[in-house]
Image (cartoon, grey):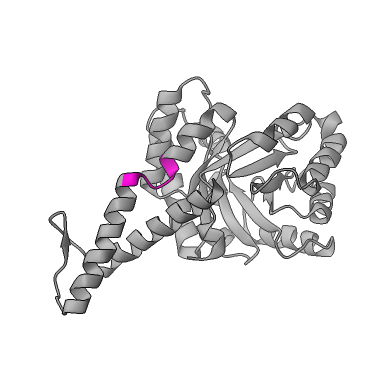
C-alpha cells in the first residue's frame, strides 16, 4: 500500500473557515482529517478574512497529527486563484477543489499551485459532484500524481440529477460505483459524501456501513457528533483483525507444508484473501498509531 493510501481518513470533517471558534474547537476533535472550508461555509463578504484565518491555522502547528486541507472556491469563481495561491504558501496537506469536471481542470490547479510555490507534500483532492465529472472520473483520477484523493460531493450530485435523498441512496449508486472504480483503477483514495441529518445517528451509521461495504476509505462529515460512529465503523473491527491474522497464519503454514488448499472457518483461502487481510492489518496498525 502507498503512504497516501495507508493514512487513515475514516473521518474527514468540514470546518467553516470564517468561524474562529470552530477552528479553535477543531484542534481537539477526533477527526482523521479536517477540511477548512472557504467555499460553501463562507459568505462572499467574508472570503478574504476566512482565507487569512485558514492559512494561519494551517501554519500554526496546533492541530496535532490531523491531516489539514483547505477547500478553495471553485475554478469558475472570482476567489479561486487567490485561494489557491494563498493555500500554496500555507502548505497544507492538500487543497480540496470543488466541482472538478476534467483532467484539464486538474492540470490548471496543479499549474497554479506550482507557480505559487506549493511544497511537494501539498496534494490535490478533487471533488466529484456533477454528472460530467462522474462520466470522466477515471481521467480525473489519473490526471496528476499530485492528485491523491477523490471526494464525493453527493449533495451537489443529487441536485444535478434532480434526485431525492432517500435511505440506501439508490439514485446515487451508479455514480458512487463509477467513482470507486475510477479511484481504484488509478490507485487513489476515495471519500464518501456527507450525511445531512445530524440528528439521525441510526441513518448515519447505516450510510457509513454502506460506504465501507462499497469500499470507500472514509466519509466526509458536517458535524462533530458524527465523528465517533464514523471512526468506529470505518476502522477494522476486532473480528476483522482476528480473522485477518488467522488467514495470514493459515496461508503461511500451508505454504510451508506445501499444501495447495487452505481453509479458514470453512472457506477456501487464496492469495487475494491474504492480500486483503494484510491491508486490514496495515490499516488497523495505522489507526492504532493515531491514538
Which picture quadrant has residue 119?
Answer: bottom right
Where is residue 53? Give x, y as percent. Answer: 83, 38
Where is residue 226? Give x, y as percent. Answer: 52, 30
Which picture quadrant has residue 272?
Answer: bottom left
Please determine whether, in this image, residue 155 is positioned above or below residue 107.
Answer: above
Compared across the picture, whether 28 is left or right of 193 comes to right
Which residue is at 57% across, 47% downward?
Answer: 151
Between 109 and 286, the one nearer to me in the picture: 286
Between 239 and 47, the one nearer to me in the picture: 239
Compared across the picture, whether 56 is left or right of 15 comes to right
Compared across the picture, whether 159 is left or right of 48 comes to left
Please determine whether, in this image, residue 97 is positioned above or below residue 249.
Answer: above
Compared across the picture, whether 7 is left or right of 269 comes to right
Asked if the stretch drawn in magenta spans residue 284, the answer is no
**Does residue 195 appear in this view?**
no
**Does residue 101 appear in this view?**
yes
Q: Specify start and end residues of the magenta stretch as a single range.
A: 233-238
Which residue is at 70% across, 30% downward?
Answer: 25
Which residue is at 58% across, 40% downward?
Answer: 31
Which residue is at 52% across, 66% downward?
Answer: 2
Between 172 and 196, the one nearer to me in the picture: 196
Which picture quadrant has residue 79?
Answer: top right
Where is residue 154? Give x, y as percent. Answer: 53, 38
Where is residue 163? Give x, y as percent. Answer: 47, 31
Question: Which quadrant: the C terminus?
Answer: top right
Residue furthest toward the top? 199
Amino acid at each position: 500500500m502507498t503512504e497516501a493510501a495507508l493514512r487513515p481518513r475514516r473521518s474527514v470533517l468540514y470546518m467553516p473557515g470564517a468561524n474562529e471558534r470552530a477552528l479553535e474547537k477543531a484542534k481537539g476533535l477526533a477527526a482523521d482529517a479536517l477540511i477548512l472550508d472557504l467555499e460553501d461555509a463562507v459568505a462572499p463578504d467574508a472570503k478574504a478574512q476566512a482565507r487569512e484565518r485558514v492559512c494561519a491555522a494551517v501554519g500554526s502547528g496546533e492541530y496535532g497529527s490531523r491531516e489539514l486541507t483547505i477547500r478553495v472556491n471553485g475554478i469558475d469563481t472570482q476567489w479561486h486563484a487567490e485561494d489557491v495561491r494563498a493555500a500554496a504558501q500555507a502548505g497544507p496537506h492538500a487543497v480540496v477543489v470543488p466541482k472538478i469536471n476534467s483532467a484539464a481542470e486538474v492540470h490548471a490547479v496543479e499549474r497554479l499551485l506550482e507557480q505559487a510555490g506549493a511544497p511537494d507534500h501539498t496534494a490535490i483532492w478533487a471533488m466529484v459532484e456533477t454528472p460530467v465529472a462522474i462520466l470522466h472520473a477515471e481521467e480525473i483520477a489519473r490526471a496528476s500524481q499530485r492528485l491523491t484523493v477523490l471526494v464525493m460531493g453527493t449533495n451537489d450530485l443529487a441536485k444535478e440529477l434532480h434526485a431525492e435523498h432517500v435511505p440506501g441512496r439508490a439514485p446515487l449508486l451508479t455514480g458512487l460505483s463509477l467513482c470507486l472504480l475510477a479511484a481504484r483503477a488509478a490507485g487513489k483514495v476515495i471519500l464518501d459524501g456527507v450525511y445531512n441529518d445530524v440528528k439521525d445517528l441510526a441513518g448515519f451509521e447505516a450510510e457509513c456501513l454502506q460506504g465501507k461495504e462499497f469500499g470507500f476509505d472514509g466519509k466526509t462529515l458536517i458535524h462533530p457528533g458524527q465523528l465517533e460512529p464514523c471512526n468506529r465503523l470505518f476502522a477494522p473491527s476486532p473480528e476483522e483483525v482476528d480473522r485477518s491474522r488467522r488467514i495470514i497464519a493459515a496461508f503461511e503454514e500451508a505454504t510451508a507444508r506445501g499444501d495447495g488448499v487452505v481453509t479458514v472457518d470453512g472457506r477456501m483461502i487464496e492469495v487475494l484473501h491474504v492480500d486483503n487481510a494484510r491491508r486490514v492489518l496495515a490499516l488497523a496498525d495505522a489507526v492504532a498509531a493515531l491514538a
